[in-house]
Amino acid sequence: AFITIVSKNAPSFKVGKSIKVTERPYQKFVETKVATSKAATAAIGNKTNLAFNKPTKTSSEESEHTGRYANDQEQNTYWSANSFQVGEWFQIDLENTLVVSKVKMVFPNEGNYRYQIELNTEGDKWVNVTDQRSNSSTNKVREHQSQTNLKGRFLRITFTGLPEGKKASLAELEIYGSE
């Protein structure tokens, strides 16, 4: 069997004039895994935002400010609840059970947002990551380190207090950890 190759807009092969390619034996590709320590894997994992573009679920949302805007790495877009009521929540599906070591939140505005962050380990069992129901911070950016190696697939932020005239909202959520 013969295959005829026609080149368009390229030099054509001419018998006796074109340089022949030397025959090489086929080398099968064999993937080799580089051994990495658990510490190295954890260090790499802690630099990757595990929340980026993961599926979200919310108690309510404005049509122009849906849940997907809270983890798109764009601080000028944000999720906003549809009401001014406390109790609104934002939830993210990490799509795998992961160890969560740090949660970083960026609000659209400075203000005294109060909230509780929980991690779902199994079914309806929620474990507290941090309780900020009594905080007095008005910082736009908040970071919370996990004191233990909490594992979970779903992370939920429930708003328990809001700045006056503001809705529950989140400009950016970043989650760091490892598998």
Image (cartoon, grey):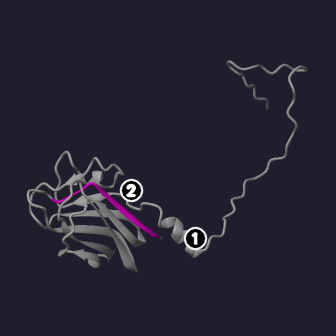
Residue 113: image quadrant is bottom left
Residue shown at 21%/49% (left/top)? 65
Horizontal side, residue 69 vs residue 9: left or right: left
Residue 115 spot, x, y in % from top left = 20, 70
**Badge 2 amino acid:** Phe
- The crowd level at tag 2 (other Cα within 10 Å; few <14, some 14-19, many 20+) is some
In depth, the one of 128 and 140 nearer the eye is 140
Is 174 in the magenta?
A: yes
Q: Which residue is mark 1?
A: 40
Q: Which region of the structure is painted magenta?
A: 168-178
Separation of residues labelled 2 and 1 (CA atoms) = 21 Å
Residue 15 spot, x, y in % from top left = 87, 20
Residue 157 spot, x, y in % from top left = 24, 67
Residue 170 spot, x, y in % from top left = 24, 57
Horizontal side, residue 14 vs residue 171: left or right: right
**Badge 1 amino acid:** Ala
In depth, the one of 98 and 41 nearer the eye is 41
> Earlier along the polypeptide chain: callout 2 or callout 1?
1
Residue 80: image quadrant is bottom left
Query: Does 147 appear above or below 87?
Result: below
Helix, strand or loop for the magenta stretch, by majority: strand
Q: Which residue is mark 2?
A: 52
Horizontal side, residue 37 vs residue 101: left or right: right
Of the residues tagged 2 and 1, which is closer to the observer? 1
Q: Secondary structure at mark 2?
A: loop
Query: Does 148 appear above or below 168?
Result: below
Residue shown at 8%/56% (left/top)? 165
In depth, the one of 159 and 154 nearer the eye is 159
Horizontal side, residue 160 vs residue 70: left or right: left
In depth, the one of 77 and 90 nearer the eye is 77
Q: Secondary structure at mark 1?
A: helix
